[in-house]
Image (spheres, coloured by chain):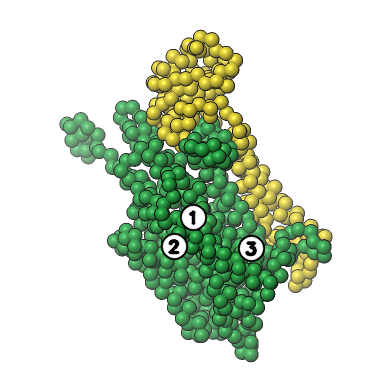
């Protein structure tokens, strides 16, 4: 057998041709090209679309702050809340935004631990998205407390009444989960930025830019003794962020699951929420990346293959979410609790049937289009589906929160929630905040991790002939 | 210039075009027994730690002790607040139990460990550093772009102006420069 295999090799005198991996940066670009192209987004003249986009986002964001000022000065009665429905759009928006953040951490931490090299093109902007989504999320629980000037009582700080927070409450766990999540995401993001800020510093043409980027770069010289500690720290931060991201949405789900309300009190919630969070987050990553790669001319770094891979993640997590919807119904029937079953029947066929079926259409039906390669590689269709995912996941949280609350235990306390203009404008305004922050980010910071993208090219590999390997080069 | 090394000179900087060239130079410098030297690269080069003889980074210890501190702080804080200083009875359950305190302690473990990791990395690398002789050099700015630099400090006991330069030339560097402190 081996003689048969060896014979053709011996006669031709060559080794079999090595199968090359599909490149992550197209057209065999040089290392210098990568930093020129990515840093160029912050250095070149402002593209025409930036100011209109920024002004629209800024105006929409201002609308949110006006609504919040009106809310604080008048009271939570300006929202559509009523007596069975005490949580509605506020907490829906909170869970929606915090869930979006999860894809950023999944890309930056989990895919890093799994050695998925394609993450390098999207991790920086996905992490930025996480931070901005957490900023949007943080606003809603803060303003829904009513007397917002007492919101600091949520934190374990000494106050005039000498009362401490009550740590048995999942709402307090949530305070710690979300604030830890925001802080650790910021640390992780900044750690990744340090070498790129050094690139920006070394390219800076003006003294102010050199000083400001230099301050952020901490005096980074690319020393390999530093890289050694840096890479270990980065790995550890990825290792810490992974259990963190799983815990954050689990704890968010405890806000509901630890209560006794039928429709909330289910053990499937933690994994179901985490899968939904990643699903919604990848939807938002695609919503942002598809325009970004075109408008900033980054198609060779964020390639069609990247978009296609994200489509596959959406397909996988969307299937988990669909399974969870089915399992919730199965357990409501199989558990034999008539109140639980009534809550679920009411969810699908009661007064809020329309929101339930919007959710099912967007989250269960549309992701399955990603089975087809032609659809995954068509940027316009992927963009449209990503919007559907965003809509569907907002409705999921609305369905869970409002349909479970609007039928209280006694029929005399049944109600119906309708949003007021303040509810609607505050929510739309949070997109303004999100977009404003994201536009500032792509203008002032490298939107793609320059040093990491360089590191996954063949010319960065000292054992590849493009990387300077001598004789018998192999990968 | 090579012959009289003044006290002000920081070291010899040799430029390379590929990570492979820099790695071969690193291997020969390691084998020659130098101590105060480094390779500066735009991205972490796979295998360079071994070529330079760098041992596993100790950052993990900072992470570990940071995490332990976070967990202990959480448990002590919750016991003090709910079980000691202002006792809150909920449903007749014990005033303190590690189970209800766990989610918060879990988060604090991660929070403290993440801070300790970043601070530990900065401490081990002596960062932030606002001044560095290499950063004054214009050519060295390409280290964050596409060039690879091997730096041997004049403070190294094995340093010799002629021999060290020859070693770097043999390693294949096309541009060698003496950098001022």
Question: How many C-alpha atoms fall within 10 Å of the one at disc 1: few (<14), some, or many (≥20)?
Answer: some
Question: In the rendered image, which quarter contains the C terminus of chain A?
Answer: top left
The one of A216 and A65 positioned closer to us in this rendering = A65
Q: Which mark is residue A439?
A: 1
**Chain under disc 1:** A
Task: Tell me whether the residue at label 2 lies in contact with that at label 1, contact meaning CB atoms closer than 8 angstroms.
Answer: no
SS for callout 2: helix
Task: Check the image and report above or below for A408 versus B88.
Answer: below
Same chain for mark 2 and mark 1? The answer is yes
Q: For the point 44% across and 78% down, which residue is it?
A: A357
Rendered position, A21 above or below A423: above
- Mark 3 packing: few (<14 Cα in 10 Å), some, or many (20+)? many
Chain under numbered label 3: A
**Viewer-nearest of discs 1 and 3:** 1
Instruction: Pick the quarter of the image with the N terminus of chain A.
Output: top left
**Residue located beneath label 2 in the image:** A283
Residue A376 visible somewhere in the drawing: no
Residue assigned mark 3: A174
Nearer-N-terminus badge (2/1): 2
Residue A12's place in the image compared with B82, above or below, is above
Judged from the image, the secondary structure of the residue bearing numbered disc 3 is helix
Q: Residue at x 41, y 34 (%)?
A: B146
Residue at 54% over, 73% down: A424
Residue B149 higher or lower than A315, as above or below: above
Chain A appears in which tint?
green
In the picture, one chain is yellow; tell me its letter. B
């Amino acid at each position: 057998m081996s003689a048969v295999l060896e014979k053709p090799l011996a006669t031709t005198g060559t080794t079999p041709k090595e199968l090359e991996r599909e490149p992550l940066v197209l057209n065999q670009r040089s290392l210098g090209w990568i930093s020129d192209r990515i840093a160029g987004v912050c250095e070149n003249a402002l593209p025409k679309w930036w100011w209109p986009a920024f002004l629209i986002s800024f105006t929409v964001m201002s609308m949110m702050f006006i609504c919040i000022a009106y809310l604080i000065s008048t009271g939570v009665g300006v929202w559509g809340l009523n007596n069975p429905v005490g949580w509605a759009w506020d907490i829906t928006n909170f869970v929606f935004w915090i869930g979006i953040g999860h894809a950023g951490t999944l890309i930056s931490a989990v895919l890093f631990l799994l050695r998925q090299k394609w993450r390098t093109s999207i991790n920086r902007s996905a992490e930025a998205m996480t931070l901005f989504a957490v900023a949007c999320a943080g606003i809603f629980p803060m303003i829904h407390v009513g007397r917002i000037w007492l919101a600091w009582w949520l934190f374990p700080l000494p106050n005039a009444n000498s009362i401490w927070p009550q740590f048995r409450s999942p709402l307090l766990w949530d305070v710690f989960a979300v604030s830890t999540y925001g802080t650790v995401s910021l640390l992780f993001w900044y750690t990744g930025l340090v070498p790129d800020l050094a690139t920006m510093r070394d390219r800076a043409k003006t003294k102010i830019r050199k000083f400001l980027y230099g301050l952020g770069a901490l005096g980074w010289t690319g020393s390999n003794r530093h890289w050694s500690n840096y890479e270990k720290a980065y790995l550890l931060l990825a290792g810490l962020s992974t259990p963190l991201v799983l815990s954050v949405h689990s704890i968010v789900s405890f806000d509901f699951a630890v209560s006794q309300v039928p429709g909330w009190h289910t053990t499937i919630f933690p994994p179901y929420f985490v899968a939904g969070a990643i699903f919604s987050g990848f939807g938002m990553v695609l919503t942002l990346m598809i325009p970004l790669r075109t408008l900033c001319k980054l198609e060779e770094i964020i390639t069609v293959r990247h978009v296609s891979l994200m489509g596959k993640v959406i397909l996988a997590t969307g299937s988990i979410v669909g399974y969870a919807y089915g399992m919730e119904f199965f357990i409501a029937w199989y558990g034999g609790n008539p109140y639980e079953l009534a809550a679920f029947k009411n969810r699908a066929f009661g007064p809020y049937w329309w929101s339930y079926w919007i959710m099912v259409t967007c989250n269960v039906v549309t992701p399955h289009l990603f089975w087809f390669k032609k659809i995954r590689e068509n940027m316009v269709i992927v963009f449209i589906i990503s919007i559907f995912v965003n809509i569907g996941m907002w409705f999921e949280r609305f369905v869970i929160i409002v349909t479970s609350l609007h039928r209280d235990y006694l029929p005399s306390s049944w109600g119906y929630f309708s949003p007021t203009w303040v509810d609607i404008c505050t929510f739309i305004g949070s997109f303004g905040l999100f977009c404003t922050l994201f536009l500032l980010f792509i203008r002032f910071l490298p939107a793609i991790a320059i040093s990491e993208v360089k590191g996954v090219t063949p010319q960065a590999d000292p054992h590849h002939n493009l990387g300077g390997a001598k004789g018998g080069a192999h990968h | 210039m090579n012959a009289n090394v003044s006290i002000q000179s920081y070291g010899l900087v040799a430029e390379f075009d590929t990570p492979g060239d820099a790695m071969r130079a690193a291997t020969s410098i390691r084998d020659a027994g130098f101590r105060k030297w480094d390779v500066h690269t735009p991205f972490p080069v796979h295998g360079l730690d071994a070529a330079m003889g760098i041992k596993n980074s100790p950052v993990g210890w900072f992470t570990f002790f940071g995490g332990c501190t976070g967990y202990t702080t959480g448990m002590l804080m919750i016991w003090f607040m709910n079980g000691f200083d202002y006792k809150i009875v909920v449903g007749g359950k014990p005033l303190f139990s590690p189970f209800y305190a766990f989610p918060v302690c879990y988060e604090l473990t991660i929070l403290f460990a993440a801070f300790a990791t970043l601070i530990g990395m900065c401490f081990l690398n002596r960062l932030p550093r606002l001044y560095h002789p290499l950063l004054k050099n214009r050519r060295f700015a390409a280290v964050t772009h596409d060039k690879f630099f091997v730096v041997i400090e004049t403070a190294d006991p094995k340093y010799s102006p002629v021999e060290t330069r020859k070693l770097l030339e043999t390693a294949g560097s096309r541009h060698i420069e003496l950098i001022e402190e």
